[in-house]
Image (cartoon, grey):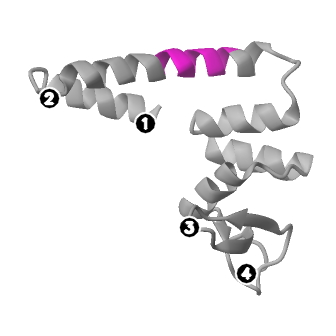
Amino acid sequence: FGAIDTFDEFLETYPEHELAAEAEDIRNTARGEATSLNFALETDETLSPTKRFETMFRLGYHQDAVDYMLNRNLTPENAYLLDMYQIGYLCEDDELTGPAYDMTEPDGTARELHFCEFGK
């Protein structure tokens, strides 16, 4: 919900800005998507473990998603691994323990990642 809050703040602060209409459209789309995703998490017992992880992660419940991922022994798609690397959940360090995840950056750089807190 952080992005939605940021758009709300922008629109409150700069209601006449040339990008206000576009920002409002993006915010409304994001709000609708967040509502749908939250509803799915709360009510859809048929969500696969992978979809449940992805939904939690997309909603910004990163730590909950990581805990769920570990408990279910999931290997997310490359895009999620990249996000987790960029925000500091996964690190490239031979000294770390725990599960390893192969991730490829957009420039083609391949990395073997582990959770940053394992093995410290």
Q: Nearer the viewer, mark 4 or mark 2?
A: 2
Q: Earlier in the sequence, mark 3 or mark 1?
A: 1
Mark 1 and mark 2 residues within 8 Å of each other at the beta carbon: no
Q: Nearer the viewer, mark 4 or mark 1?
A: 1
Q: Which mark is residue 120?
A: 4
Say which amino acid is labelled 4. Lys
Within 10 Å of disc 3 (Cα), the crowding (few <14, some 14-19, many 20+) is: few
Question: What is the distance, in whole Å, between disc 3 and disc 1 at their CAs?
Answer: 28 Å
Q: Which mark is residue 13?
A: 2
Per the image, the residue denoted by label 1 is 2
The segment highlighted magenta reads 31-39
Q: Nearer the viewer, mark 3 or mark 2?
A: 3
Per the image, the residue denoted by label 3 is 107
Q: Nearer the viewer, mark 3 or mark 1?
A: 3
Q: Quick one: quadrant of the C terminus?
A: bottom right
Quarter of the figure with residue 27 = top left
Q: Residue at x 73, y 22 (%)?
A: 41
Q: Residue at x 22, y 31 (%)?
A: 10
x and y percentages locating residue 95 in the rendered image = 76, 86
In the rendered image, the vertical position of residue 46 relative to residue 54, given as above or below: above
Name the chief secondary structure element in magenta. Answer: helix
x and y percentages locating residue 78 in the rendered image = 71, 54
* Element assignment for label 1: helix
Say which amino acid is labelled 1. Gly
* Element assignment for label 4: loop
Question: What is the distance, in whole Å, between disc 4 and disc 1 at their CAs?
Answer: 30 Å
Q: Is 86 displayed left or right of 70 in the figure?
A: left
Q: Earlier in the sequence, mark 4 or mark 3?
A: 3
Question: What is the distance, in whole Å, between disc 3 and disc 2 at their CAs?
Answer: 37 Å
Q: Earlier in the sequence, mark 3 or mark 2?
A: 2
Q: Residue at x 81, y 15 (%)?
A: 44
